[in-house]
Image: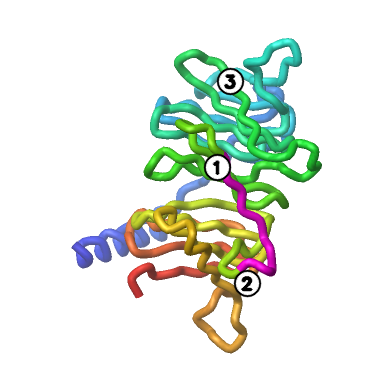
């Protein structure tokens, strides 16, 4: 299998070199119906719709037309905030929407209604939601800008919050969260402005394992500012880590 993969890659490279293609980019702007040119996040759902979070509303694009969702003060089923920072689709097809205002919204494609879920102190000016994840048990994890990590249980409605505290051993390394991932072994990875964290949801009381830069160790994290963490779709044991100083990989087994 590995030999076949290598041969395929060599053939692909040869074709690309010998037959160069003109890469064409198409710009989609407000002239085509996009609600704002400031795009913060996007995703494609199971039905094929492209969801685009902007600074002036949430857009759903079907390939030709936009449907825009904006806050309507007179409608409790409208989106809570027009500035969208994070998007995620759960196993049931619901779209979870994180806003700059710090509110979590859940859109049901069946009822076409939006439910507001308050997860933190809205009095804070920096509770903006930066990342959303549904784990294998259906629990929702939410990363924020300065207010740490939240966990929301849709069944019980219970909310738990972790924040950085230098006095707490094995605590969260930083309150500014940039991305979330659950790997194929069930661990939750949390990238932050200061370190990469790993949490076992089955042993939450054990706390966070924190990965930081160590100048004396060439195999440590290349930078403490971690922007993105993802799992390879080809190599099951490989985690990709994007930092402010290059790209790192982490082998789960080794």
Q: Are marks 1 and 3 in contact (CB under 8 Å)?
A: no
Above or below, comparing residue 87 to residue 23 in the picture: above
Q: CA distance from mark 2 to mark 1?
A: 23 Å
- Identify the element where label 3 is drawn: strand
User: Which is nearer the N-term, disc 1 or disc 3?
Assistant: 3
102 lies left or right of 243: right
Q: CA distance from mark 1 to mark 3?
A: 16 Å
Q: Nearer the viewer, residue 247 or 122?
A: 122
Give the magenta part as a residue range: 159-168
- Identify the element where label 1 is drawn: strand
Residue 114: give its label.
3
Above or below, comparing residue 125 to residue 218 in the picture: above
Which residue was labeled with disc 1? 132
Label 1 crowding class (10 Å Cα cut-off): few <14, some 14-19, many 20+? Answer: many
Residue at the spot 40% in from the left edge and 54% down from the top edge: 202
- Which is closer to the viewer, label 2 or label 1? 1
* Residue 107 drawn at (x, y percent): 54, 23
Residue at the spot 32% in from the left edge and 60% down from the top edge: 236
Q: Nearer the viewer, residue 207 or 106?
A: 207
User: Which is nearer the N-term, disc 3 or disc 2?
Assistant: 3
The image quadrant where one finds the N terminus is bottom left
Q: Per the image, is 149 magenta?
A: no
The image quadrant where one finds the C terminus is bottom left
User: Which is nearer the N-term, disc 2 or disc 1?
Assistant: 1
Q: Nearer the viewer, residue 244 or 147?
A: 147
Residue 223: give its label.
2
* Residue 126 drawn at (x, y percent): 77, 45
Q: CA distance from mark 3 to mark 2?
A: 39 Å
Q: Nearer the viewer, residue 103 or 36?
A: 103
| Magenta span main SS | loop
Q: In which quarter of the view is residue 73 placed? A: top right
């Amino acid at each position: 299998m590995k030999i076949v993969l290598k041969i395929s890659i060599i053939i692909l490279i040869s074709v690309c070199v010998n037959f160069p293609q003109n890469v064409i980019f198409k710009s989609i702007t407000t002239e085509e119906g996009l609600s704002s040119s400031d795009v913060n996040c996007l995703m494609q759902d199971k039905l094929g719709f492209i969801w685009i979070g902007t600074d002036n509303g949430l857009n759903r694009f079907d390939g030709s037309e936009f449907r825009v969702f904006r806050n309507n003060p007179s409608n409790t089923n409208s989106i809570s905030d027009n500035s969208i920072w994070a998007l995620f689709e759960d196993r049931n097809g619901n779209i979870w929407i994180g806003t700059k205002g710090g509110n979590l919204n859940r859109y049901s494609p069946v009822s076409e209604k939006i439910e507001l879920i308050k997860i933190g102190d809205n009095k804070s000016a920096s509770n903006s939601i930066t990342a959303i994840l549904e784990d294998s048990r259906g629990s929702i994890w939410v990363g924020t800008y300065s207010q740490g990590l939240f966990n929301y249980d849709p069944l019980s409605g219970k909310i738990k919050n972790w924040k950085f505290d230098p006095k707490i051993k094995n605590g969260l390394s930083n309150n500014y969260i940039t991305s979330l991932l659950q790997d194929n072994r069930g661990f939750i990875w949390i990238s932050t402005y200061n370190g990469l964290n790993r949490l076992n949801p089955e042993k939450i009381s054990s706390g966070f394992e924190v990965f930081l830069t160590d100048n004396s160790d060439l195999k440590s994290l290349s930078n403490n500012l971690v922007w993105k963490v993802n799992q390879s779709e080809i190599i099951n044991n490989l985690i990709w880590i994007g930092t402010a100083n290059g790209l790192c990989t982490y082998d789960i087994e080794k």
